[in-house]
Amino acid sequence: MKQKLSQEFVFQLFALLISIIVVHAAYVGAIRPAANAQLQQQAELQAAGGDYVPQRSLVVVIRDFEQEACFILLFWALAIMAYKALRIQRERDTLERSLLDIPEGTTVLPQDAREYSRALEALPAHEQDYLLPRT
């Protein structure tokens, strides 16, 4: 039996790959060169003598691989949370719609259920996934 990958899994996989690429590009292109230049400048000022106290800047603090991994995981988690929030909003919109035009107090008999279920079957597949059957 061949299982189809879920849309959520594919989204999470691509969100991880995109966050790795974007964060690593920022580190290689901007953060590490700026931190190395600043550390080199501070080393030259210390070697020249005098009472120089090196100043720590943000790029020097976040230049290491551990911080890069933390930023990758941060953006991945934010993407997953945004996906979940969007899905919840869509589910709420579905709950607020009137899916079946049945007057309040009407008794639905088993033979009538098929007729009423056609409106639910006409929904797009992604909206049908929002509905849970009651058993």
Image (cartoon, grey):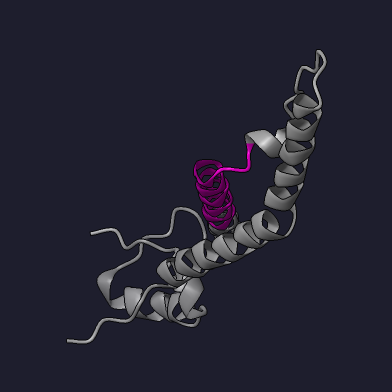
Q: Which of 104/71 is in front? A: 71
Q: How many marks?
A: 0
Q: Quadrant of the C terminus?
A: bottom left
Could one spot residue 52 in this view of the protein?
Answer: yes
> Which x, y percent locates residue 126?
49, 74
Please tell me which residue is depicted at 81% across the width and 13% down the height of the picture: 51
Q: Quadrant of residue 8?
A: bottom left
Q: Main secondary structure of the magenta part?
A: helix
Bounds of the magenta span? 62-85
Please tell me which residue is depicted at 56% across the width and 43% down the height of the picture: 64
In the image: residue 44, left or right of residue 14: right
Q: Is residue 56 above or below residue 104?
A: above
Q: Is residue 50 magenta?
A: no
In the image: residue 116, left or right of residue 134: right
Q: Which of 115/55 is in front? A: 55
Q: Is residue 118 above or below residue 91?
A: below
Q: Which of 30/69 is in front? A: 30
Q: Is residue 65 above or below residue 9?
A: above
Q: Is residue 58 above or below residue 85?
A: above
> Which x, y percent locates residue 106?
43, 59
Q: Quadrant of the N terminus?
A: bottom left
Please tell me which residue is depicted at 64% across the width and 33% down the height of the picture: 61
Extreme bottom residue here? 1
Q: Which of 47/63 is in front? A: 47
Could one spot residue 96 in this view of the protein?
Answer: no
In the image: residue 93, left or right of residue 41: left
